[in-house]
Every structure is written in C-alpha cells, then in structure tokens.
Amino acid sequence: MRAHLGDQLVIESPATGATRRDGEIVGLHHDDGTPPYDVRWSDTNEVTLVFPGPDAHLHHIEHGQQPGTPQGASQPDTVDPGPVSAAAPPTGTPNPGDIGRRVAAERHRSGLSLGETARRARMSPDYLAYLEEQPADPTLGTLVRLADALGTTVAALRGGGIDLPPGQGQALLHPRLRDLSPQECRTLLSTHGVGRIAIPASDGRPAVVPVNYEVVDDAIVFRTAPGSVPAGAVGKEVAFEVDHVDDAMSQGWSVLAVGPAHVVTEPDAVHGLSRRAHTTPWAGGEREMWVSIRPTSLTGRRITPADE
C-alpha cells in the first residue's frame, strides 16, 4: 500500500463490503508512501495515526482532474489541481473562494511570484492560478505546503483567526527592537492602507478609530463624514498609526505620524483625491469629507531576530 497526500483511506466491513469509515490522508511518515498515515476522518474531522489493516484500501485521487469535474469530462491539459479530497470539508470553514483570495493576498504580501510560490509548494503554477481565481477546495496537504511556502499557517489561509487580534504567537527567542528612519517610515506607509487615528475628544477623553487612508504628496488623507468621530480631528494636532504584525514569524513594525489635521475644501483638490483614491471607505455610507494630516513628526520601530 502506497499513498499520496490527499488520497482517501476507506475502511470496509469484511462481511458486507460496505464502507464503515473513510478519511483523507493528511500526513505521510515514509517518503515511499507506505504506512502508517495521519488520517483526517470525514465523520469526526479528527486526525489519528492509522496502520491500515486488511479491511482498508486506498482511493487514489486523480491529479489531473479539477475540483467538481466529473470522471471522464474534458478539461484544460494545463491545469494540474493536485490532490482533491473526496471527503466533505470541515464544518465551519469559509467559502472555498476565500481560501484562494487569502493565498493570493499572502503571496503578494510576501513579494513572491506565482511561479516561485508554486515551486516552493511543489505544485503546478496553473493549479495555483486556478486556486487563486476560482472557488476551490484544496486538501489539507495542499494547504500545508502553501502555508509553508508563504510563511503563514493553514488556519490563516482558512480565515480561522479573522476575529482574533494579531500577535498571539510566541515572542522571538532573541528579538531586536530598532528605530526606523523617516524614509523607512514613509516607505512603510506606502500609498494607502488602513491606519488608526488618535483624536483628543472635546470631553477630554481620547478616541482611536481605524480609517482607510491614502498618502498624497507626503500628506496622510482619509475620507469621513461631517459629525463623525474621525471628523473631530479637524483643527487639532492628532496622531496617526499604521502597523503590521507577522504572527508566523513573530515580527512586526509600527509607524507613528503626528501633525495638524485640516479639512480639504478646494474643489480641484477634492476631485483629485477622489479620482486617485485606491479604495472607498470600508465602513460605507456617504463619506465625502476629506481630511489631511501633514506630519511634523514621523517615527517608527521594527521587531526582528537579533541576527538580522
């Protein structure tokens, strides 16, 4: 018996031949594919170490068949979807399309080409492109290889930590905290993203809210609505913070900009900002008031391993 990641192990009744249990092989202990195997059972979603007996056999998944394509149906020769699980996906996983979008986002964040990511994950570039662009349901083995190639986790690719704050991993054994130069801070701010603005409220209590921002001519600008909490920044000196946390590597950085905020009223300037905006505010609604922060102070810090 020789298996590949993603193959299905089926346990049958010796008397009737009916399937008693089946599961996906998610771990191999020998390079030649011989037992034992780590199997994720379809009925419990638990992974156990299995030494198959005489009542067990393998169902080898076609490597050249796209998910959802019937046996014998024609399909592009260039697409190699890799192993496809015949078992139902674990309960509570997001829409399979979410996985492809998360894979693409992590790949772009890591600065990796599609070909390099596929090489690291030991899969066809055509299948990786298919996975990123189409609703697909890759096996756990495929996700493990992709997570390793992208320096992240299977849970992150599945969106399992979407409602958890970042930074829950272990700290580096020998961390190094260093200050960033103003130029490094500008580079990390880049052109747009999501940051937090700290506003001294009129009642004496500060407020911190996230906003979608743009960087235009060294000024940080964002859209909001009159009377909203972010609109309270106008006419005050405020702090604006952007950061990134890499849970997988226990590294991260933060940039803090401090300066006065004012509302943009000149029609041509407002039109130019709206035209050049990369995204609309995620919060939705009518948010056509542009606020600009011209930093008078720009500082930042980065955590890396001590030997970098």
Image (tube, rainbow, N blue to C red):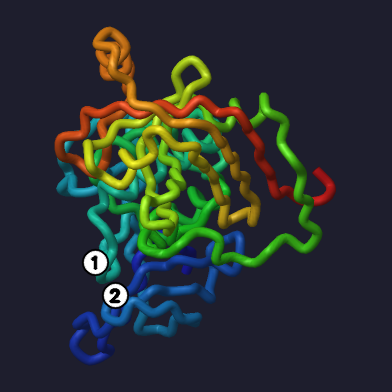
Q: Decide: is 164 above or below 177.
A: below
Where 47 falls versus 179 (above or below)?
A: below
Q: Residue at x 63, y 33 (%)?
A: 298
User: Mark 2 and mark 1 in contact (Cβ < 8 Å)?
Assistant: yes
- Front position in the image: 20 or 158: 158
The residue at which mark 2 appears reads as 42
| Residue identified by numbered label 1 | 88
Looking at the rendered structure, the secondary structure element under dot 1 is loop
> Visible in this render: residue 219?
yes
Direction bottom: furthest residue? 15
Q: Residues within 10 Å of mark 2 (few under 14, many from 20)?
A: some
Q: Residue furthest right?
A: 307
Q: Label 1 vs label 2: CA separation?
A: 6 Å
Q: Nearer the viewer, residue 102 or 186?
A: 186
Name the residue rendered at 35%, 29% in the picture: 291
| Residue 267 at x, y percent in the picture | 24, 11
